[in-house]
Structure formats: structure tokens, C-alpha cells
Image (tube, coloured by chain):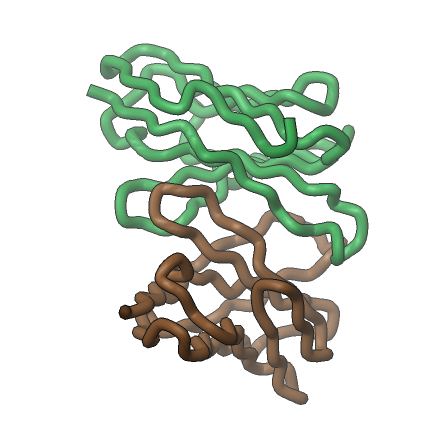
Chain colours: A green, B brown
Amino acid sequence: GAGVSQSPSNKVTEKGKDVELRCDPISGHTALYWYRQSLGQGLEFLIYFQGNSAPDKSGLPSDRFSAERTGGSVSTLTIQRTQQEDSAVYLCASSLARGADNEKLFFGSGTQLSVL
Amino acid sequence: DAKTTQPTSMDCAEGRAANLPCNHSTISGNEYVYWYRQIHSQGPQYIIHGLKNNETNEMASLIITEDRKSSTLILPHATLRDTAVYYCIVRAYGGATNKLIFGTGTLLAVQP
């Protein structure tokens, strides 16, 4: 595909359940980011993957959150034992990450997570 | 990465130029200025970036002051579809951290 693809677009879950959110970056993009955006708020950085380097996990809010990126492409963000405060739009972005001119992030449309 | 300061909101008449200011007084020599925007219910969209020279592309112009402590994003002929939150971000390429940190941005409302 031409852009960053995220699935599902909407996810409703019950408090305490685990959820997995998927991101397919643009082909050839080596950098991948996860952000979340609560209603009416700005973007909160979660985690950053760059090639084979160790990911920057400094934004993950708790140990219930984890993410992996397999084969340098698809990424999955997992939230265990979901809480109501986890409700937000989860956005994924990718970039070529080669030189400042290529550090443009391309965002997906996000996954709207609602925890009941 | 240096912190940026932007007005919370601005209005602009349709067809007129929209000038969005950003202060980044603590910017370092290797830090670029990036602008993104987020239209309601969509992911952010890259607009433009620059280091010290003024830049122009099909979407906008970026004017950076000579001391690089502030910049202005210019949308030359604003349309209703330009209504969005505009984020000014300062980031060093190749630094210890490559994460892009978004602030609260400026809500630009283009009025008919």
C-alpha cells in the first residue's frame, strides 16, 4: 500500500482484557513510531523503532504496554489488562530516517480504542 | 530537543495568508524546525522543515529568523480545509534520541 496502515480502525474492549494493535509501515521505511492521543489532547510519544537498534521505550506509560517489530516491518502494540484510561486513538508513523530531509513522518489513520 | 512555544489558537479569513508563529529560543545549531498539522480525526501530516534558510514547497513557506530563535509558517491562501492544529517541532537529526515530540500546537480556524 501507499501509506501507513493500521488495524483495527476501532476496537472496543472490556476492562481487564488484552488488546493488540497492528501497524504496517510504508515499505522501505526503517523507522516506526507509536503515539497515542486522548480526546482533546496532544500526541503522546510511546515507543520508537529504528532498524535493528534497541527500541526507545521511554514513552510507554506502564509495564502493561509493550511493542514489537518483526522483520523490521510490521509492528504490534500490546496493552495488557486494559484500563479505562487507556482509551485513546493510537497512532503509528513511519519514516525513511536517512538524513534530515527524509525524517518526515507519515502517519496512519489510527486505532480508536475504547475500554468499557 | 529544544522546547517550542506557539499561540493556542488563531483565526484567519479564507483566501488570506495565515501566518503561524513559533518561538524556539533555546534551539541548538544542529536542530531543525519541523511543521506538522493535524486535521480533525486524522493523523498528523508533514508540512515543511528547515535548518536556517527559508523554505517553500507546494503547501507552505517557512521563514526562520537569522538568529533561529523563532520561525513563521505561512499558508499563502488559506482555505477552509486548512483548519487544523499546527505543530512546530524542533529536533536534532542523529541525536541521542530521534523521537519527535509534539507540543500542544496552534488551532488555526479558517473563517469563510
In percent of the image, x 60 and y 73: which residue is there?
B61
Residue placed farthest to the top in the image?
A17
Q: Is residue A101 left or right of residue B18?
A: right
Number of marks in the rendered image:
0
In percent of the image, x 60 and y 21: which residue is there?
A68
* Quadrant (top left, top right, bottom left, bottom right) of the C terminus of chain B: bottom left
Residue placed farthest to the left in the image?
A116
Residue placed farthest to the bottom in the image?
B66
In percent of the image, x 80 and y 47: which residue is there?
A98
Percent across and percent down for residue A66 are 51, 23
Q: Quadrant of residue B63?
A: bottom right
Any part of residue A62 in sight = yes
Q: Is residue B20 left or right of residue B64?
A: left
B1 vs B63, nearest the viewer: B63
Examine the rendered structure and indicate whether residue A76 appears above or below residue B106: above
Percent across and percent down for residue A71 are 74, 18
Percent across and percent down for residue B37 are 47, 56
A91 vs A85, nearest the viewer: A91
In percent of the image, x 43 and y 59: which residue is there?
B103
Examine the rendered structure and indicate whether residue A10 appears above or below residue A105: above
Percent across and percent down for residue A24 are 60, 24
* Quadrant (top left, top right, bottom left, bottom right) of the N terminus of chain B: bottom right
Q: Quadrant of residue A80?
A: top left
B105 vs A48, nearest the viewer: B105
Any part of residue B104 in sight = no
